[in-house]
Image: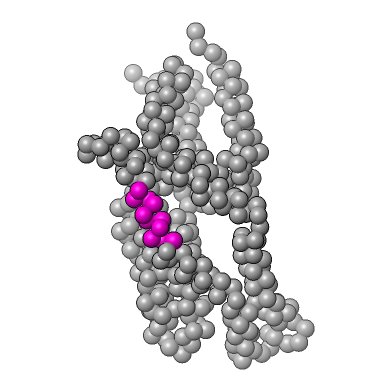
Amino acid sequence: MGLPVRDQLKYWGIAAAVFLAMLWLLGDVILPFVLGGAIAYCLDPVADRLERAGLSRVAATVVITLAAILTFVILALLILPMLVEQAVQLFNVAPQLARDLFGFLTAQFPQLLENGSTLRQSLLTIGEAVQSRGGELLNSLVTSAASLFNLVVLVLFVPVVAFYLLLDWDGLVEKIDRLLPRDHAPTIRRLAAEVDHTLAAFIRGMGTVCLILGTYYAVALMLVGLQFGLVVGFIAGLITFIPYVGALVGGALALGLGLFQFWGDWLTLGMVAGIFVIGQVVEGNVLTPKLVGGSVGLHPVTLIFSLSVFGTLFGFVGMLVAVPLAAALGVFARFGLAQYTRSPLYKGLSEQDDP
């Protein structure tokens, strides 16, 4: 005889509370395992296809690992040094950009910049603040022993965790399936399949979209001649998974830098703006429909809210798990709503179930 619903809710509620408490308390400790699990989850379909092509699971995992190492080496040798160099230069020229903005506003709107005005003081300090904060951030990342240790842990542990999880992924799924409550196993499998479909559509699809758009923005801006184009493209591509935010932030940053570099060259400025307009059109009409699809079920407001809440509560780890948890909660919410609309609580006593 199964447990009463009240007892089941109590036990599952305790399990959820323990999970959230561990996430909050362990935080940075479980970061390599969260990243490794995410990588293994994303690469599992590739390993399955290689298995269907005739490779063993071990051979498929080794092939994927070697391809990932080769890609990382190429990025480390060709792109990362340039990206770091441009980021450092951007921090260093921030005061000059602020002074140029100050001069432009002084010429165009002198009444806004009277001596002692708040706007004047803000513009005088914004460049130095950005430079000092940026310098502090870079120095802490480079000189802090704890940061270096955490970075080494990530670089060493994440690939190892991802390798072993990818190697044993199917076995782990099978073991978890055997531990499911027998009375609810079919329902849990169905919900898990819906969650997997949602995550696959969003994480794998949007990851590909972010990579494509980030590469496009960076290459296009560098071809136009925009300074720090690689940094702008990287930032725009990184936050493309938040609808419209990537294009808006990247476009505003690119146009802001372009105004100082290409002032008077309206054709080049138009090309910079056109790069982001084309990117947004291609994303909305080609990339997102093809790679993500319309059945993800994550509303943009829900996504932003989830990132804000989990990021505030659990830090960087919370931001990593925000999208998967939001997708899972969305599936559970739709399931609960369907159960509610079929229950007597919704239908009342006067309405009978359909035969």
Residue drawn at (45%, 73%) of the image: 229
Q: Is residue 114 left or right of residue 61?
A: right
The residue closer to the viewer here, 103 or 160, is: 160
Residue 45 in sight from this viewpoint: no
- Percent across and percent down for residue 198 are 40, 41
Query: Outermost residue, bottom direction?
Result: 107
Tell whether 149 sits left or right of 336. right
- Residue drawn at point x = 65 percent, y = 52 percent: 146
Residue 167 at x, y = what percent? 38, 35
Whether the magenta-drawn stretch holds residue 69 is answered as yes
Q: Nearer the viewer, residue 38 or 64?
A: 64
Which quadrant would residue 140 be assigned to in this image?
bottom right
Confirm whether residue 272 shows in the render: yes
Q: Residue at x 60, y 41 (%)?
A: 29
By secondary structure, the bulk of the magenta-drawn segment is best described as: helix
Residue furthest to the top in view is 1
Q: Tell me residue 297's x, y (percent).
A: 42, 44
**Which residue is depicted at the point 47% across and 24% down?**
343
Residue 194: image quadrant is top left
Quadrant for the C terminus in the image:
top left
Residue 41, horizontal then vertical, whole percent: 41, 40
Colouring of the image: one colour
Residue at the extreme left: 53
Magenta segment boundaries in residue numbering: 66-76
Q: Is residue 297 above or below residue 353?
A: below
In reply to whether residue 188 is colored magenta, the answer given is: no
